[in-house]
Image: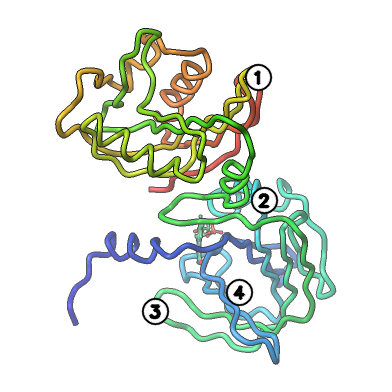
Amino acid sequence: MKKLDPKLLRNAFGKFMTGVTVVTAVKDDGKYVGFTANSFSSVSLDPPMLLVCPGKFLSSYDTFSKCDHFSVNILSEGQEKISNIFATSDEDRFLKVPHSLDMNGVPIINGATVQFSCSTRNIIPTGDHCVLIGQVDDFKLSEEPGLGYVGGQYFSLGLERAAFNKTVSNAICGAIIEDGENIILIKSPDGLHPPQCKAIDRSNLIKDLNSTMIDHGISAKLGQAYSVFEGVKSREHSTYFLATGNIISPSPEVILIPISQLNAQKYSSPAISRMMSRFSLEAQSRNFSLYLGDVEKGSIHDTLERN
Ligand SMILES: Cc1cc2nc3c(=O)[nH]c(=O)nc-3n(C[C@H](O)[C@H](O)[C@H](O)COP(=O)(O)O)c2cc1C
């Protein structure tokens, strides 16, 4: 058999967009166990069956490999912290996460968009994981959109769609483009700003942004939405994406600024200045969040980059 590169294989599996679940069960001594899993799949409607794949490396593998009951909780947008607790924290995860008990006495995660209560039907040890197949005894379903996960990062389709659905007259779309250790910025009489375009027809914004970048001699690939805000007076709607790229044949306005020097620059508006300062801080941990609000106040929505 051909020897496959495990890191590349992990990246390949990671291309598949999934939701995020927390799978729980009860140990023999009555303690609750749980872990974050995106290996969830529906299996059958009649009878109702689902599966999830606990890894043999899990501290709770022994419990999951012989449990009679378990629960699968599909996390909602905004529950990234709960996902991280069940993926990393060593302490008692259930002390930190609000939960209730289902009909089988198994913990279910409060606020999860779906909570499935299951009875184990089959456990198939497979490679370094097992396939845990359960019959769904009951489930609770809410209106909350589910949290997404791809390429080691969370995403929130509900939020990203909402960012695009607003009906405002003017829209600005820009990209914070990383070129190695530098950020590609544009010089303007008012100060620096990311490559950006302005449009009235919002349906063409991404296309216009890509053309703007090409006009500046920049080749870039857009990533997650990073900042979505509205001007308090102007009602101008701005959306900035994270991106990676490089300069091919720069226009005279293009300038490369090291990430470490972003805070020392003069920007074309206070909102951009605040966004760039948040970026330079978050770039240190690679833990980028999504800002939603107006130019003065808004909320940070966590996303996480896993290596
Ligand atoms: C988004 C995401 C999905 C994951 N999916 C799985 C999975 O399907 N199966 C698994 O065994 N571990 C999965 N993990 C890893 C476990 O959640 C992680 O190793 C956890 O900390 C193990 O629990 P333990 O510390 O009790 O061993 C996933 C982690 C994340 C962040």
Q: Nearer the viewer, residue 305 or 176?
A: 176
Mark 1, Cα crowd under 10 Å, few <14 / some 14-19 / many 20+, is few
What residue did someone put label 4 on?
Answer: 64
Q: CA distance from mark 2 to mark 1?
A: 44 Å
In what element is the residue under mark 2? loop
Residue 237 vertical placement versus 167 (above, below):
above
Residue at the outermost right position: 103
Q: CA distance from mark 1 to mark 4?
A: 52 Å
Residue 34 in the image, given as x and y percentages of width and height:
64, 62
Mark 2, Cα crowd under 10 Å, few <14 / some 14-19 / many 20+, is some
What residue did someone put label 1 on?
Answer: 232
In what element is the residue under mark 1? loop
Residue 115 vertical placement versus 189 (above, below):
below
For residue 154, side relative to residue 193 (left or right): right
The answer as to whether callout 1 falls within 8 Å of ligand 1 is: no
> Which coloring applies here?
rainbow
Residue 130 in the image, given as x and y percentages of width and height:
49, 79
Residue type at tag 1: Val
Q: Quadrant location of the N terminus? A: bottom left
In what element is the residue under mark 3? loop
Q: Nearer the viewer, residue 2 or 123?
A: 2
Which residue is pictured at 71% across the width and 46% down the height? 96
The answer as to whether callout 2 falls within 8 Å of ligand 1 is: no
Question: Mark 2 vs mark 1: which is more N-terminal?
Answer: 2
Residue 85 in the image, given as x and y percentages of width and height:
60, 49
What residue did someone put label 2 on?
Answer: 92
Residue type at tag 4: Phe
Residue type at tag 3: Gly
What residue did someone put label 3 on?
Answer: 127
Question: Mark 3 vs mark 1: which is more N-terminal?
Answer: 3
For residue 250, side relative to residue 172 (left or right): left
Mark nearer the viewer, 1 or 4: 1
